Structures are given as C-alpha cells and as structure tokens.
Amino acid sequence: MILFDPDQPEAAGGFQQTAAASQVAPRSALPTRQTLQRHLRLAQQAVGLRGEVAVLLTTDRGIRGLNRRFRKQNKATDVLSFPAADHGAGIAGDLAISIETAARQAAEHGHSLSVELRVLMLHGLLHLKGFDHESDDGKMARREARLRAKLKLPLGLIERTESVPVKPAPRRQKAAQ
C-alpha cells in the first residue's frame, strides 16, 4: 500500500511541487501510485517477503521526525524500515521514504526518481526481511546486489556509502567425483 504522509502538506497534496518541477526536469516526476505499487510488489516477490507492506511517502521533515522518534537520530534519511512485531497477522511491516531525499539522490546518481524509489524500496524490504548491513558481514549487500541485477537497478545504498566494494559470496566448489 502506498500512502502520502497526511502530516506533511507537500506529501498530503501528492507532492505537487515535484510534479511541477518535472515539467522542467521530467526525470524527477513522481510515479503514479499504481506504478509504485507494482514496483513494490515486484521487489517484495524478489525478496521473498510475505505479508502486507505499507510505504509512507513523506518529506525530509517528516522522515527526520520519524528517525528522531524511533532511532534517536535527529536527521533526515532516505528510507526507514519498521518490521512488524508479529508476521502471523499477515503484515510484514512499514517503510517510510523521503521523496525530497530520493529526488536529490536520483539527480546525484543520474537516474530518475522512479528508479531511486525502487532502489529505496528494495533496500527497505530487505530490512523487513531481517537483513542488517550494519552487522551481517556483507550478507545484505550481496543479496541486494543480486536482486538489483535481477530487477535491473543501478548501484544500491550500501555500495554508495561503503568505501570498499561489495565482495561476491564465495562460490561452493563441486565435490570431487
């Protein structure tokens, strides 16, 4: 489910300023709710995550408030993941994405806002699945790299922030016959 943050006027209005800016820079156009829902479904299938996922599209101010409240970090970020406490209820969790940060990152990396939102959703879904790149010795980075290739997405968040490139997982050798 794709939601526009009702507490942020820009988001509640469907990010009309982003749509207006897209007349000048079409690559910054916000995809339709249906397109975003389709991207979410495809990424969720690729990750193998079952259950409902809600994606809140918000502003830098909105995500900063969430980051401060839930992670004790007083800064805006691109994506936050909130795994459900009980997956048995058919809910996998929630994601919050800052459209403003996503638009800046898309411009910095030379791709569209739509592509950046797909990268952010994939990253967030992996967190909902239980991956944690801060403590898993590269496991999430390798999985994200494989899924980005499968989904035809550019460089992911982990590779952008780490100075060392992601090493591929070691290949298993076939047993001698």
Image (cartoon, grey):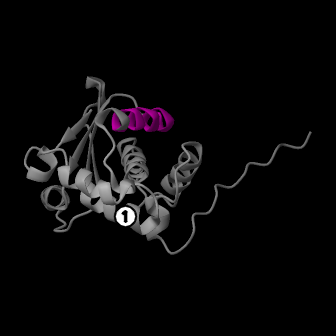
Q: Residue furthest front?
A: 23
In x, y percent, where is residue 33?
Answer: 29, 36
Can you say whether 125 is above or below 158 in the image?
A: above
The quarter of the picture where residue 78 lies is bottom left
Can you say whether 50 is above or below 150 in the image?
A: above
Task: Name the residue: 57% across, 68% down.
Answer: 165
* 133, 162: nearer the viewer: 162
The verdict on residue 108 being magenta is no
Please name the residue that numbered disc 1 is placed on.
105
In x, y percent, where is residue 157?
Answer: 43, 60
Task: Name the residue: 50% across, 65% down.
Answer: 159
On-image quarter of the C terminus: top right
Q: Amino acid at mark 1?
A: Gln
What stretch of residues is rendered in magenta? 36-48
Task: Name the residue: 7% across, 48% down.
Answer: 7
Taking the image as shown, residue 5 lies to the left or right of residue 155, namely left
Rate crowding at label 1 as few (under 14), some (14 to 19) or many (20 or more) other CA atoms within 10 Å: some
